[in-house]
Amino acid sequence: MTQATAPAASSSPPASPAAPKDGRTSERSLARRLAARPEIGALIAAIVVYIFFFAVASPFREASSLANVLYEASVMGIMALPVALLMIGGEFDLSAGVAVTTSALTASMWSFQLSMNVWTGVIVALVVALAIGAFNGYMLVRTGLPSFLITLGTFLILQGANLAITKLFTGNVATDSISDMDGFDQAKSIFASEITIGGVDVKITVFYWLVLAALATWLLLRTKFGNWIFATGGSQESARAVGVPVTFTKIALFMGVGAGAWFVGMHILFSFNTVQSGEGVGNEFLYIIAAVIGGCLLTGGYGSAIGAVIGAFIFGMVSQGIVYANWNPDWFKAFLGVMLLLAALVNLWVRRQATRR
Amino acid sequence: MDRTSRPRSRRIALVAAAAAAALMVTGCSSDSGGKKAEEDSGNASAGKADTPRMKIAMITHAAAGDTFWDLVRKGAETAAAKDNVELVYSNNPDSAKQANLVQNAIDQKVDGIAVTLSKPDAMKDVVAKAEKAGIPVVGLNGGIDDWKEQGLLSYFGQDEFVAGEAFGEKLNALGAKNNICVIHEQGSVSLEARCSGVKKTFKGKTTTLNVNGTNMPSVKSTINAKLKQDTSIDYVVTLGAPFALTAVQSVDDAGSKAKVATFDLNKEMVDAVKGGDIEFAVDQQPYLQGYLSVDSLWLYKTNGNFSGGGQEPVLTGPAFVDKDNVDDIAKFASKGTR
């Protein structure tokens, strides 16, 4: 129900020629509603990509390979979730990639430089990550500038600060290893351990990813806040006019991205022990790509969390599938681009088919 | 609605801050590791020359935040401190922008320029300009084939291709049959040169693998995938120290028996070599490259000396670090200068 009212608040989702009928009142069949879900195209694209690599690359068929694909997808996907929510809310966050590195650096340096239990660093990093999100959101609602500009600024600031502050404290451009410090093993078991299922080691991030996806879906479709997100992304003015707290929604969404960056940052810190200050640049686009493949519109007001999960999964399959298939590595990026474009096209085609009838 | 929500978020922030403070106060200190455990670091230092103050510019093609280039810079800073030199360091991986930085140094009328020629043709004109302006120029790290032709005084570095060849020979000696050469920055000339050097001398099979160096989890997955795709791989060759440490995890995840060897060193690497996780590392002594280029300019200005006689490059590598000699360099690496 919440979903059905949402597009009505948006001015006009371009992919729905059914709009003139006024979707607010008409009852649609379950099958039709399913077919018009934003993630259905991505789901079909994912199945096509999976079958494709299953056919051409024999190592891809092993369960452990799937675990490996899921691992890459999960690290990207955990960030793609809040980024997707933010995009449905009508905004971008270009600082998301480096914010991950910022939180990892913060936790690592805080613990190391003060010789404190690593958990203190973990908490300080959470505060910093949320503060970055709050800053982005606050600047956005205060200035009214496009989020593209504001977060581009944050992106550059963080990129420079990551390097300069790391250099200032450690004298190097990478942090010192914290693997021998108190609390490390405990934190590692929470953020970066593995769980063995049927003889296959699955990284714990995969489970967090799926749990967070369920949470995000519930938030979007079953809560008031979810309605606010769709309404804000569809049309900010109308949302405000009907009493949606736009300012709160936007700041909360940016802080959600901050929380995601914190989590992924902790995973990276505890699985690799040290962090290089230059990492993370460019990943912000991967998150956006995952959300868009999964059916989020670049204009806001439409999309889903499950879609972002599938988008990240497609990206993981393609980037690892190319290696499993042993294609010429010089063409790697080109293959990746073609596969992603194809996935996006299948997605678009399915969505058109679904809404045409 | 805004009014009701704002105090709440402020309260949450307060609680978080209070929690962090409480943890600090209650003495959540770590008994092991950390800064306390780290020995006093500091660059090698000696007396200071009493020659007139001069200004030397070092312009590299380093990407920001690269551990390797940090060592080059530290070496240069040490030499500058010793020789009473004001060092102006700048870097840009984009060759056109790097050329602009050289022009900037010429405009500043510096007393000497140390420059990397990673894309020699792009630097040609601006290097000629510096020489025309009477500024001595030395090369480092990149440009071993072009430094002489462009009229540079000396060159300090390793030939990446030669280092790759030596690496390949070493793999032969260790009985390797099938290796992958992991390129963490696709299209980088020096990284490609290392892999082609390995390929040339290595008797078995060498396959290159491109990974996204700014995304560690992806590096880990991709190496894992490659090991699954070709289970006969017995050596993973990485081109940077952090990637070697990640490759060790990939090998473990993939349940492969492959060994890991790498170009370049950092301080975590020392333990990994000691513990046998990494077979060996090739060091091109970046600290030495930075140090010598500044020092040689000082010598040229004060005494008219040419390192390498102006004829031959001064090679700083490849030097192999393995279990047998790792202890000798461990203490320097832990200071972050080797």
Image: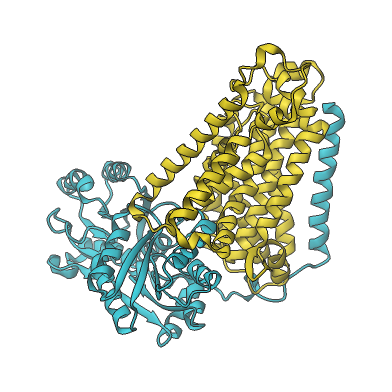
Residue found farthest to the top: A20
Query: Residue A77, image x and y in percent?
Result: 62, 48
Number of marks present in the image shown: 0
Spot occupied by residue A115 in the image (x, y as percentages of width and height): 69, 68
Whether B37 is drawn above or below A187: the answer is below
- Any part of residue A106 in sight: no
Q: Residue at image x 38%, y 65%?
A: B239
Chain A visual colour? yellow
Compared across the picture, whether A114 is left or right of A62 comes to right
Task: Identify whether B169 is placed above or below A58.
Answer: below
At which x and y percent is residue A208?
A: 71, 54
Shade representing chain B:
cyan
Residue B209 vertical position relative to residue A87 in the rendered view, above or below: below
Outermost residue on the bottom side: it is B324
What residue do we see at 12% from left, 66% from top?
B311
Q: Is residue A164 left or right of residue B116?
A: right
Q: Is residue B273 visible?
A: yes
Asked where in the image residue A235 lies, by quadrant, the reply is top right
Is B36 in front, or is A243? A243
A146 up-or-down from B72: above or below: above
